[in-house]
Image (tube, rainbow, N blue to C red):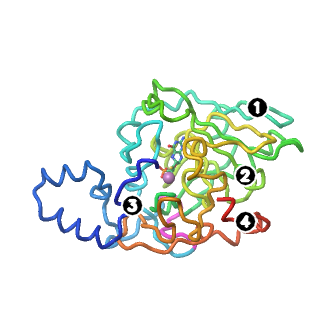
Amino acid sequence: MKKLKSLEITPEKIYLSRRKFLAGVGAVAAGLIISSGCESVNKVLEEDSPPPKSPLTGASKDELGNRLTSFKNITTYNNFYEFTTEKEVAGVARDFKTRPWTVRVSGQVRKEKTFAIEDILARFKTEERIYRMRSVEGWSMVIPWLGFPLAKLLSEVEPTSKAKYVKFISLRDPERMPGQKNLSFDWPYAEGLRLDEALNELTILSTGLYGKQLRPQNGAPLRLVIPWKYGFKSIKSIVEIELVEKRPVSFWMKSTPNEYGFFANVNPDVSHPRWSQTTERRIGEFERRPTHLFNGYEEEVSQMYKNLDLRLNF
Ligand SMILES: Nc1nc2c(c(=O)[nH]1)N[C@H]1C(S)=C(S)[C@@H](COP(=O)(O)O)O[C@H]1N2
Ligand SMILES: [Mo]
């Protein structure tokens, strides 16, 4: 996120002329330009092909009629800084072992518990949820997740009345996650939600997508998905969930406090300090499209923020 690819903030016209330029130069020169930060050259434009379908449900659209992003694009264009700050995570993470794996749930709860991933998979029935994902960088996807409400897992540990927030922590293991040798970040990756956000029906823990097990690059074996917030809140490869009294400080708040706040609700009217958030580029499409308040989930979530100034609480 810090190393924002230039394309993501390049106006479409310049992008167009750059594409023409790329088409006109030799492969070697184009390769140089690509490696200096033009991300979408390896992205398949999907608009003209038939929409992909979920093999599980046959669904090909979200509730607003947006087509699903292809499995290929969802699994080859990723952010996962534990492996690399580039989008090409898939190759680096390919051999990441997700067994054995446990998730400890602790803090302000009556029944602390350590779940083996096998318990989680057996205990919580997964369902398909087709959600839009909007990155703070200005791109978006439509993803058919497999998952279950976080609320179901939290009810098993019985939060006490002191539990006001939920903190999530990713695996820290620099031997298995080579990006963690980069000490300019404060590992492990961490995120947080207010308890009511965590209990919201839309908030899920995901174990798969397109009817298949989650790949390492998408946060295997267990990641959070919060569709009305910028993608960076949807923390991957979770090993700890802690119920706490005080608002947690997330990885991005620590790293760049003037740019990233706690809430990170998708909002076209609140610019990032370095770029506007009014539009987004759906991966697989060419034209930019408008970004919607709460990523189009206003009806389901806006009541949680009725007493909050969204400009101050970004
Ligand atoms: N642990 C961890 N979780 C993470 C990240 C990360 O670097 N590490 N990147 C975040 C960002 S910036 C985004 S946009 C989404 C990307 O999810 P995807 O690659 O599955 O599309 O994951 C989020 N979760
Ligand atoms: Mo992101």
**Does the CB distance between marks 4 and 3 fall below 8 Å?**
no
Callout 3 secondary element: helix
Near-viewer residue (55 or 288) = 288
Is tag 2's residue or tag 4's residue first in the polypeptide sequence? 2
Callout 1 secondary element: strand
Q: Which of label 4 and label 1 is nearer to you? A: 4
Who's the residue at 32% across and 55% down the image? 39
Is tag 4's residue or tag 1's residue first in the polypeptide sequence? 1
Q: Is residue 303 left or right of residue 231?
A: right
Image position, residue 95 (x, y; %): 40, 32
Q: Which residues are magenta?
A: 55-63
Image position, residue 68 (x, y; %): 46, 65
Residue under numbered circle 2: 198
Image position, residue 47 (x, y; %): 35, 72
Question: CA gap, disc 1 to disc 3?
Answer: 42 Å
User: What amino acid does circle 4 point to?
Assistant: Asp
Residue under numbered circle 1: 113
Q: Is residue 35 left or right of residue 188?
A: left
> Which labelled disc corresponds to residue 8?
3
Question: CA gap, disc 3 to disc 2?
Answer: 30 Å
Q: Is residue 163 above or below residue 265?
A: above
Q: Which of label 4 and label 3 is nearer to you? A: 4
Image position, residue 62 (x, y; %): 54, 69
User: What amino acid does circle 3 point to?
Assistant: Glu
Residue under numbered circle 4: 309
**In this view, which residue lies farthest toward the right?**
161
Q: Which of label 3 and label 2 is nearer to you? A: 3
* Crowding at mark 1 (Cα within 10 Å: few <14, some 14-19, many 20+): few
